[in-house]
Amino acid sequence: MKFTVDQIAQLIQGTVDGDGSAIITTFNKIEEGQKGSISFLANPKYESFLYQSKATAIIIANDLVLKEKPLATLIKVKDPYFAFTILLQKYQEFTSIKETGIQQPSFIEQTAEVGKEVYLGTFSSVGAGSKIGNNTYVAAHVTIGKNVRIGTDCVIYPGVVIYNDTVIGNSCTIHANAVIGSDGFGFAPQADGTFTTIPQLGNVVLEDGVSVGANTTIDRATMGSTLIKKGVKIDNLVQIAHNVEVGENTAIAAQTGVSGSTKIGKNCLIGGQVGVAGHISIADKTIVTAQSGVTKTVRKEGQILGGTPASPNSEYLKRNALLRQLPDLLKRLDS
């Protein structure tokens, strides 16, 4: 990487305040900035680093009022975080080496179809009747079952297992060791205390632009489809149970578990280690804070929920404040 500040500013539609001819060769966090690096300031908590950072250039907001003159050249934009994201994406495009071809040993059933400019890594396998779209990258040790449909421009990292009949849209990313389409947790209790397995006959559908984190599991439906809609982002170590539906552009953080047949709306944000009960619905634009438990249907859109059972976050914080005062109240009662 070797660009001038002016070139970067043009790329992210920013204006330069300082030396536009300065050379940028790497990226750094603002607190770790060094000569030749570029950083950004989006969170006001880090503003103090702006004035002492040794970075060559820093991306800031147009409306930021400077308390003193920084050492670095500034690139002013509307949204620094988004601009830096665009810059990273462009850098990745410039530097990534496109791999294509079928590596050996690998296995492709005769009835499977592999598109143009596809890469299949060593020890990968593609089952009978499956189709892989153009420009898709399948890393080593990936297992693709029978009658799977994978769209164009997807990236599937090592160790991923995709079960039979799964449908994956275009431009999806599935990170290492994720499992897509495993059996749902379906067992019928018997009179003698044993369990009978309920056959899981459905599938999983990932629509376009879905990202699935490492070691995440998305179970197939008992009947019908477990549906992950367009633009959903799922972090590492997430469990999505059978027949769940996740709405468009919802993000789910690590170690969250969503129980069977639950429907999560679009544009929701689910924090880490959240538990969601089965057979409920969560309204659009809901935010659930980390380690909360959602036990019943959320009907009102745009709420921020916290605690277990989840309730409006302001109420949850008030309850926590009162709980912290209980030891003092007990001492008063005992005295």
Image: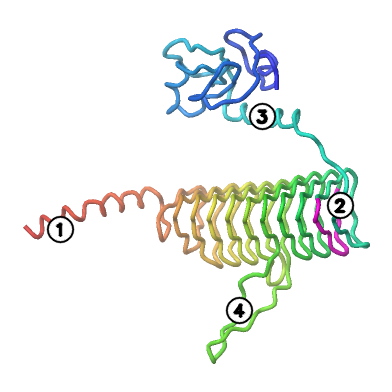
Which quadrant of the view contains residue 11? top right
Distance from disc 3 to disc 1, alpha carbons, whole Å, reads 55 Å
Distance from disc 1 to disc 4, alpha carbons, whole Å, reads 47 Å
Judging by the rendered image, the residue that carries numbered circle 3 is: 86
Distance from disc 2 to disc 3, alpha carbons, whole Å, reads 36 Å
Q: Amino acid at mark 1?
A: Leu
Foreground label between 2 and 1? 2
Q: Amino acid at mark 2?
A: Gln
Camera-side residue of 33 and 184: 33
Q: Earlier in the sequence, mark 1 or mark 4?
A: 4
Q: Are marks 3 and 1 in contact (CB under 8 Å)?
A: no
Label 1 secondary element? helix
Q: Amino acid at mark 4?
A: Phe
Judging by the rendered image, the residue that carries numbered circle 4 is: 187
Left or right: residue 51 versus residue 327 is: right
Distance from disc 4 to disc 3, alpha carbons, whole Å, reads 47 Å
Judging by the rendered image, the residue that carries numbered circle 2 is: 104
Q: Earlier in the sequence, mark 2 or mark 3?
A: 3
* Majority secondary structure in the magenta region: loop
Figure check: 173 above or below 68: below
The disc at residue 330 is: 1
Q: Which residues are magenta?
A: 122-133
Callout 2 crowding tier (Cα within 10 Å): few <14, some 14–19, many ≥20: few
Left or right: residue 4 versus residue 318 is: right
Figure check: 133 above or below 98: below
Camera-side residue of 133 and 139: 139
Q: Residue 120: x, y in percent? A: 83, 50
Callout 3 crowding tier (Cα within 10 Å): few <14, some 14–19, many ≥20: some
